[in-house]
Image (tube, grey):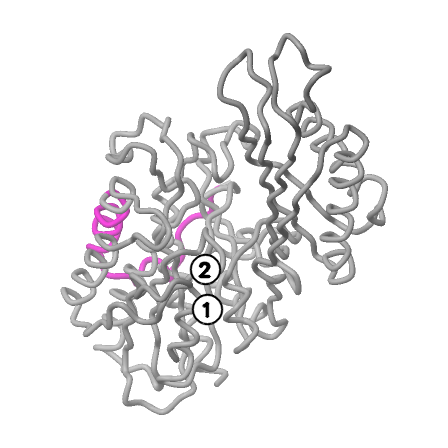
Amino acid sequence: MTTEPTSAIETLPPHLPAQLQDWFTWLHRHPELSFHEEETAEYVAAQLRGLGYSPREGVGFGPTGQRLYSVVAVLGADRPGPALALRADTDALPIQEATELPYASLRSGAMHACGHDAHTAMLLGGAAALKAEDERTPWPGPIVLIFQPAEESPPGGALGLIEAGVLEDPPVGAIFGLHVGNKDVGTFSIAGGARNAASDRFKIVVRGRGGHAAAPHKAVDPIVTAAHVVIGMQSIVSRQVPPRQPAVITIGMIHGGTKSNVIPEHVTLEGTVRTLDPEVREQMPVRITQVAEGICAAYGASAEVDYRRGYDVLLNEPAMAELARQAVVQVAGEDGLQSAEPGMGGEDFSRYLQKVPGAFITIGAGSPEVPYEERPGGHNPRSCVDPRALTYGVAFYVALARRYFAQR
């Protein structure tokens, strides 16, 4: 169900919905992958300058020392803190879009399939609405707007921004972010405590002995072995993790072979691990290595396992989650606040919450005209954000700012 707009939305600048659509359309048409968001950053900075901000570009550095394509703007920088920070992520995914939308991606092999275009458009809208309100009645403290690149690729962009002092100049007292979800436009979901899982990744190289496909007995087939490794991995969750503890192991990439009649020398598997419990997380590298090495040894092959920790569990601070709930009710009414459970998706917003209190909120962006079970999820070539959600996101930011400074 879609709730009727309330006064929190009706007080937004009248031209804003059309502007939001323009921003969202441009962003969706011009996706850029993690650590390559140069044009996106230039566009965001130009829009902020048009709104009267003086944005800083290229704040922080990535894992190889390259400058991040980040944009940071501050409203009321000279006012007493602590500041309220709002963050949007800007990167896209290496997916070929299949939505057939009139504003579909113009770039082959790249798509905004996780809603970062909507997140960025909503924060631009928030910048506009917060400044318009500031011109009527100045906010009593600073508001920091963070447009962060590289959320999709660990170690992510948040770490570089934090190391560059984005939470310190001015000092930030709380940080919030929005992420689109598949529930109806006009709804929000706020999980208390854990909101996102820890997300680690691994690579397994299965090494066999190559040979002719017609004489498999003279080779050690890494493809057959790798297939058993993939199946064996699933027994870790089903048989070695307590049933009440959520955990996911997914193999997302398999590479091996060059020709149909050649048994290759090796096969590479790459996957992700998602956990909510710290003890379960610590077990995973050991379990995965044991399964891979054991199965490979049984087939006369060997396994090389490279396990890397990614983002930590995202924990919403209870008082900040409650502040967000109050803002949601002001925007969407009591019926607009939906129940929420922790998700197994990873999110580097967790890095900010390890430094300052805050909350990460899901905003409904599914079209009510489409049955819920038919709405494609994120990271799907048919992922689609209903643009009507954008105005709700902006109204939420304004309502949140009012409540944050009132309670501060």
Cβ atoms at labels 1 and 2 below 8 Å apart: yes
Report helix, strand or loop for mark 1: helix
Residue at image position (38%, 50%) is 116
Q: Outermost residue, top direction?
A: 214
Which x, y percent locates residue 362?
51, 53
* Magenta-tinted stretch: 2-25
Please tell me whether residue 273 is drawn above or below residue 148 in the rendered image. above
- Give the amino acid at mark 1: Leu
Q: Nearer the viewer, residue 162 or 79?
A: 162
391 left or right of 176? left
Please tell me whether residue 191 is drawn above or below residue 382 in the rendered image. below
Q: Tell me the distance, in whole angstroms, between the alpha carbons under discs 1 and 2.
A: 6 Å
Residue at image position (36%, 31%) is 97
Question: Is 21 within the magenta?
Answer: yes
Residue 236 occupies quadrant: top right
The residue labelled by disc 1 is: 159
Report helix, strand or loop for mark 2: loop
Residue at image position (71%, 37%) is 302
Q: Outermost residue, left direction?
A: 50
How crowded pointer 1 is (Cα within 10 Å; few <14, some 14-19, many 20+) is rated as many
Which disc, if any, is residue 156?
2
Which x, y percent locates residue 339?
64, 52
Which x, y percent locates residue 115?
41, 46
Question: Is 402 within the magenta?
Answer: no
